[in-house]
């Protein structure tokens, strides 16, 4: 294990620093926007702009890497992503923030493509699970650390924006100074959404649902919690509790999905997720902070693994020559959901209150559960083919990107 991680240590260190800044930025911007009296719809626009940029970055990232190489692209994207938070702090207005969030989403999407394709290049079939387990653990951990950095200063000051800029800039140092061999060029895949849906309807709809739920959470959860807490720093604790829940729930659910029809795991996740969401929606105004944090933990443990299991199910049915197309298409669908969700949920919040954010989540969970049950009746489980291990479905709370692998263990014996 040590040897496997040593070959990507510099990249993992740079990723940890980068995502620490990303974690702080994710909670600082909606908190500052709330303190500046931006409407919930405006804050939803920021989230939608981020994921629009993210989707475009995923679409164009491979071409950029092919043209300039991994290292140059990483340096360029960190430079732009470092400038954005400083501009956020200097120019506080809706139009500027929407543009900057879109630019940030584009940069981080390309950075994730660089990181994950690089990790895949360095990993082997024997150690890929170890390498990406470490990667996912780093993602969850440093995002939580970044959230807690909100407590270091007043969100109304420029200092926290400057700290984000410093972290993103410094993240490039270990990567640029690494003496490890750079990954080979990757081929750009053509995405066929009709074939993607025919390959795995539940994988497609599950990924879209995950984008709807997670996009809303990252964009508007801070708005929700600040409506029920006088201290804006409470947002950091709430979002951290959800991230920790996601880290805790990821592997037990993934381990179980390796041993049963993954669709039944999705059904259970959706059932429990809908219940937690409804309780959060109805009970939050009457609960104390600790209870709200507990609900955030439970929600994260159910919502964040939805993407992972949906992707794993889709890959169970993918043949080796379509693996890249499947991964790219699912990522783009996730981005579409993450764009739409922050634009729709604020409508409910404006009518029913901030906690109606979780009414939106409950509707998404319920719809996915109903659709999955219908598909289970129409198509048998993937029992007769070799399911890909869950930990090879490269996933992290916010860093889903195209996966490049030379070999795939799954055999194609049908379309599922």
Image (tube, rainbow, N blue to C red):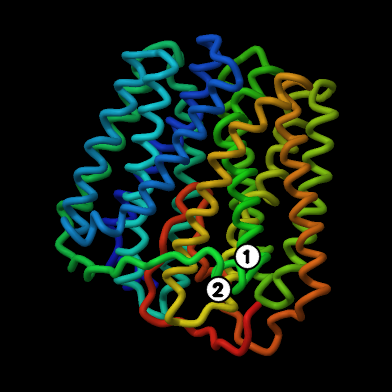
Q: How many marks?
A: 2
Residue 126 seen by the camera: yes
Name the residue tied to disc 2: 315
Residue at 39% x, 34% y is: 102
Q: Residue 302: where, in percent of width, then height?
A: 70, 51
Coordinates of residue 67 in the picture (x, y in percent): 17, 58
Q: Residue furthest front?
A: 194
Residue 48 vs 269, above or below: the answer is above
Name the residue beneath numbered marker 1: 203
The quarter of the rendered structure image containing the N terminus is bottom left
Secondary structure beneath dot 2 equals helix
What residue is at 39 percent from the left and 66 percent from the top?
190
Quadrant of the rendering where the C terminus is positioned: bottom right
Is residue 18 positioned above or below 30 on the image?
below
Q: CA distance from mark 1 to mark 2?
A: 8 Å
Q: Residues within 10 Å of mark 1 (few under 14, many from 20)?
A: many
297 on left or right of 33:
right
């Amino acid at each position: 294990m040590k040897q496997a991680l040593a070959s990507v240590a510099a990249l993992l260190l740079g990723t940890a620093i980068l995502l620490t800044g990303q974690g702080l930025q994710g909670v600082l911007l909606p908190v500052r926007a709330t303190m500046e009296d931006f409407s919930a719809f405006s804050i939803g626009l920021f989230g939608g702009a981020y994921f629009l940029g993210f989707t475009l970055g995923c679409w164009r990232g491979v071409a950029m890497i092919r043209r300039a190489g991994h290292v140059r692209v990483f340096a360029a994207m960190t430079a732009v992503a470092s400038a954005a938070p400083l501009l956020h702090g200097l120019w506080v207005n809706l139009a500027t923030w929407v543009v900057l969030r879109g630019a940030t989403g584009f940069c981080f999407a390309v950075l994730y493509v660089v990181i994950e394709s690089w990790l895949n290049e360095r990993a082997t079939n024997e150690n890929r699970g170890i390498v990406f387990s470490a990667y996912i653990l780093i993602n969850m951990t440093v995002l939580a650390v970044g959230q807690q950095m909100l407590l270091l200063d007043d969100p109304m000051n420029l200092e926290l924006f400057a700290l984000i800029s410093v972290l993103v800039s410094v993240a490039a140092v270990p990567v640029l100074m690494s003496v490890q061999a750079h990954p080979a060029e990757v081929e750009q895949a053509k995405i066929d959404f009709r074939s993607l849906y025919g390959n795995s309807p539940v994988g497609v709809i599950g990924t879209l649902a995950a984008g709807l739920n997670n996009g809303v959470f990252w964009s508007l959860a801070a708005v929700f919690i600040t409506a029920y807490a006088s201290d804006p720093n409470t947002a950091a604790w709430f979002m951290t509790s959800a991230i920790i829940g996601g880290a805790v729930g990821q592997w037990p659910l993934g381990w179980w999905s390796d041993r049963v029809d993954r669709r039944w795991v999705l059904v259970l996740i959706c059932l429990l997720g809908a219940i937690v969401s409804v309780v959060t929606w109805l009970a939050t105004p009457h609960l104390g902070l600790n209870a709200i944090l507990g609900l955030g933990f439970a929600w994260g443990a159910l919502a964040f693994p939805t993407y992972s299991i949906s992707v794993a199910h889709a890959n169970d049915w993918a043949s080796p020559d379509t693996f890249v197309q499947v991964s790219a298409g699912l990522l783009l669908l996730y981005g579409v959901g993450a764009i739409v969700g922050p634009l729709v949920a604020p409508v409910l919040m404006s009518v029913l209150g901030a906690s109606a954010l979780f009414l939106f989540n409950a509707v998404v969970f319920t719809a996915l559960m109903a659709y999955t049950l219908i598909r289970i009746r129409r198509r048998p489980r993937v029992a007769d083919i070799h399911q890909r291990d869950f930990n090879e479905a490269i996933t992290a709370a916010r860093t889903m990107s195209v996966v490049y692998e030379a070999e795939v263990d799954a055999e194609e014996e049908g379309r599922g």
